[in-house]
Amino acid sequence: MDMPCAVIAGRPNVGKSTLFNMLARERVAIVDPTSGVTRDRLSRNIRHEDRAFELVDTGVMTSLSEDELDNEVQRQIDIALGEADIVLFIVDVKAGLLPFDSEIADRLRRLEKPALLIANKCDTEKAERSATDFFALGLGEPIGVSALLGRGRYELLDAILERIPRFEPPESRGEFAMKLAIVGKRNVGKSTFINCLAHEDRVIVSETPGTTRDAIDVRFEKDGRQFVAIDTAGVLRKGKADSVGFYSMVRSEQSIRQADIVLLMLESLADVSRLDKRLARYVTDPHKPCIIVVNKWDLAEGVVTGEFDGYLSKTLTGLSYAPLSFTCAKTGHNVSATIDLAMSLYKQAGIRVPTGRLNKAIDEIFTRRRPKSSGKHSPKIYYGTQVGTRPPHIVLFVNDPAQFSNSYRRYVENSFRKILPFGEIPIRIRFEMSGPQAQFHGRP
């Protein structure tokens, strides 16, 4: 049995995204006074009293217009409502009952699905008493909540569980779902790539720049393995972003840090920009395995992949180890192979090298090139050990960490990639001073 689905719906600025965040107990959806911030379907699995359901936030319900993007938002809402086991219809007690609330109520009645009427912004008992005005909608007694203050959360969750099919989540969450963060500038094809993975129009694709605003989790399966693809908002230059754009960029950074693998998407016909380099730093700082996805490759006539590889090695120097994937998300070309490559990187990042093998590599690296001395004593590496995975974390015990220059540290990292099975992933290396009792292993 599939997990039951509860969909939040309502007119603009009634607090849908705030309610979503309250029930999810995390700041998932962007909350901003600007109307229509949420466009795509956002979802989170909610657990309460040993039961679970999927909670979905939607864009604002409006009438059809000539605006293609607005109509696409409405189509996404229709899809969500069609999949819902229960609709959470949210109204605003401070604004009172408005004609559009009645229109939405009529629309929901035609669905012939269970609906809960939620009166939001009941910040006080007096405000909650005014919720009785919404009885006129004919959807039963409204449940008073304050999404901003967290008031009424447990009562609302109990009411939802009373009206949806019983679903008890297993004790174990089952096979781990690998998280893939899809990042890049605006209009490079991130949402099209996600839809190709999901085999459905899960996120809105539009020529309008900045269509995606939230970080959207989309689950899909490949070869029996579960994945979560995170579609992120396109990054803007500093100073160009409004409040919504600012939160979108923050979410993109958070998504990178939470991901197991990052897909940095570039457009084949565009030069690498400062924004691309900035995103690359977001990836390298937390040592995240990364695939550079060159999308819209079908438009790059006459360009050889090897030449493009050389160009990126010079412009994105911090990701010189990252493999490339040349794709056309619109047709699906190489999209599946990119996920296979992501699985390969994930396995690489989880390898633990035996201490003996690691120290043999250190011998080879030190013998081939020794660090320059800048003090009374020559820099020495006594031994090393791997202390963690994802990313591989190696500690080198030395006589004086300060004597190892940045260039030599880069040399050691790059050499580890050539000798050890970490050829396409970042390595975290820490130089630590060893105590006087440490023995030197064969290196003068």
Image: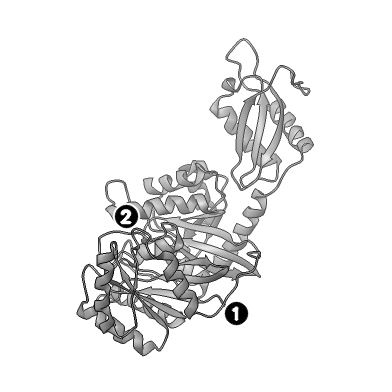
Q: Quadrant of residue 342?
A: bottom right
- Answer with left or right where residue 185 lies relative to residue 283: left
**x, y (%) of residue 210?**
33, 61
Answer above or below: position of 417 versus 47.
Answer: above
Judging from the image, what secondary structure is the residue with disc 2 in?
Answer: helix
Residue that numbered label 2 is attached to: 245
> Where on the picture, by quarter, is residue 386?
top right
Say which of marks 2 and 1 sits in front: 1
Give coordinates of residue 166: x percent, y percent.
56, 78
Q: Quadrant of the C terminus?
A: top right
- Residue 19, relative to residue 405: is it above or below? below
Q: Secondary structure at mark 1?
A: loop
- Which residue matches tag 1? 1
Contact between labelled residues 1 and 2, with CB atoms less than 8 Å apart: no
Which image quadrant for residue 399?
A: top right
Specify the amino acid type for callout 2: Gly
| Residue positioned most to the top | 376
Residue 412 or residue 116, whichever sits in front: 116
Tell me which residue sits at (68%, 38%) in the image.
Answer: 387
Q: Is residue 157 above or below residue 27?
A: below
